[in-house]
Amino acid sequence: MLLSGTDNHIAGIGSMAESLQEFQRGKPGYEGYLNDRVAALPEVLQDAGYLTIMSGKWHLGLTPDRFPVKRGFEKSFTLLPGAANHYNFEPQLRDNDTKSNLEKLTPALYAENDKVVDNETLPSGFYSSDYFTERMLGFLHDRERANDTRPFFAYYTFSAPHWPLQAPEENIQPYKGLYDDGPENLRQRRLSNLKKLGLVPEHAVPHNVVVTDRESTKKGQGSEWNELSADEKQYSSRTMEVYAGMVERMDYNIGKVIQYLEGTGELDNTFIVFMSDNGAEGALLEAIPLFGTDLEKYSPPLSSLTRYIQKYYDNSYANIGRANSYVWYGPRWAQAATAPSRLYKTFTSEGGIRVPLILRYPPLTSSTSQDGIVRSFSTVMDIFPTVLDLAGVPPVGFSFRSRKVVPIRGTSWVPFLRNQRERIHAEDHATGWELFGRLAVRKGKWKATFIPEPYGPGAWELFDLDADPGETRDLSKDELSVFKDLLREWDQYVSETGVIGVPPEYGTLRVD
């Protein structure tokens, strides 16, 4: 959605490549890669005379014909799939017995321009955030040395803080003991600070923490804090300390790129957007085997992920965060991050789709609100037209590079930030979302969601996000006309974007 300016079901990622269901395979919009129906932002900027560079995670095409260099990036170093060991410790890649579904789909983990990079040739001391930054700065220095006067578009995408949770010890140590009182106390502290900063309204009531019965049996990650032993609490809080260390290391590396732009005198003339790609990761991978079906030959049956963790990794307390550890932190810590919102990554509730974003571009942001907070609904699809608007590049029509393409669905922020409009999108503008059979549609302050069991009721609900940002009070029976209108908008969204019907077990999706 970011690089296409349109809906993921139009752009080819109706579902992630490694998660396509049989009823989705072969359908338009479910190719599993950024398809040719869209003009990618780097392609458009490349044709407009920009130097286009990328360093970091791609996850928009795993084969050479879909590498970033084929979608407009002149120079790139990329992690192709959605995740990898941050220290490049990948012994299972040579072991078909424990290779995950994702790895079986991926010819290689890394690529440089149009060439596959054998991960064993990467430098010793590799750490993803450091190396992605090194390569990004290298591309910028190359530009400087070549006296390349073209404007540049840089796509700088960390795989941190995605699991496995790993960070240099020097970045973990400052957080020692900080989370020893558990996720609920952290959740309340953060919520209080969000209200003080004006990022969340004072009247916001947080949604209850959602943990399924299966997850609640996972000691240290799913269970209530007061049900854990002292050792289990220590282990769980350590995973959060490592996560914090990953974020600090990422921040340090971003600072290096900012310093470079300060040094070249380009900082204030560079439009910078920093954002998360989704809500916090709450999945317990041992409870939900994302990496493959159970391997029945083992007793008890094991997912391929669990099998190779047991075979290659040391997840003892003293080793957490190192290259040969492979841990995650689970749903309670995730919901400490997303409060007051409901749930987390992969859900269409606010906890999954409302994310942090920081924009820096003094010529445009000097007229924003006094506290620097923009209070207007926006989507990631709006970044594409905003960049083109600022670059003076005409919008893409229905044809690009001799192929038919779809128009973008996003709206430029520029008129709003220049106080030429009251809001980014009109009050009656509707936006829909779907991923993994979790559905939502929003219009103004109203939002309808469908969250299947066991994480939701398996039925449509209606929320007033102005009054209830935590999505805690279902108003579908009290505001029936609004509810029906949103479901009509949902049908329109499906018609426009090509969402494939969700499986029948998800229940009735409309109101008569």
Image: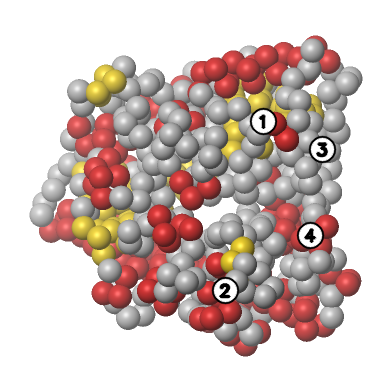
The residue carrying mark 3 is 457
Residue beneath the point at 42% across and 77% down: 91
The residue carrying mark 4 is 214
Tell us which disc is closer to us: 3 or 2.
2
The residue carrying mark 2 is 307
User: Residue 440, labelled with which disc?
Assistant: 1
Q: Position of residue 233 (x, y in %)?
A: 78, 77
Secondary structure type for disc 1:
strand
Q: Is residue 394 left or right of residue 446?
A: left
Q: Is residue 125 left or right of residue 344?
A: left
Marks 4 and 1, how far apart in space?
Answer: 25 Å
Secondary structure type for disc 3:
loop
Amino acid on which disc 4 is placed: Arg
N-terminal label among 2 and 1 = 2
Amino acid on which disc 2 is placed: Arg
N-terminal label among 3 and 4 = 4
Marks 3 and 1, how far apart in space?
Answer: 14 Å
Tell us which disc is closer to us: 2 or 4.
2
Marks 2 and 4, how far apart in space?
Answer: 20 Å
Secondary structure type for disc 2:
helix
- Looking at the rendered image, the quarter that the C terminus falls into is top right
Question: In terms of image quadrants, where is residue 225?
Answer: bottom right
Marks 3 and 4, how far apart in space?
Answer: 17 Å
Q: Residues within 10 Å of mark 3 (few under 14, many from 20)?
A: few
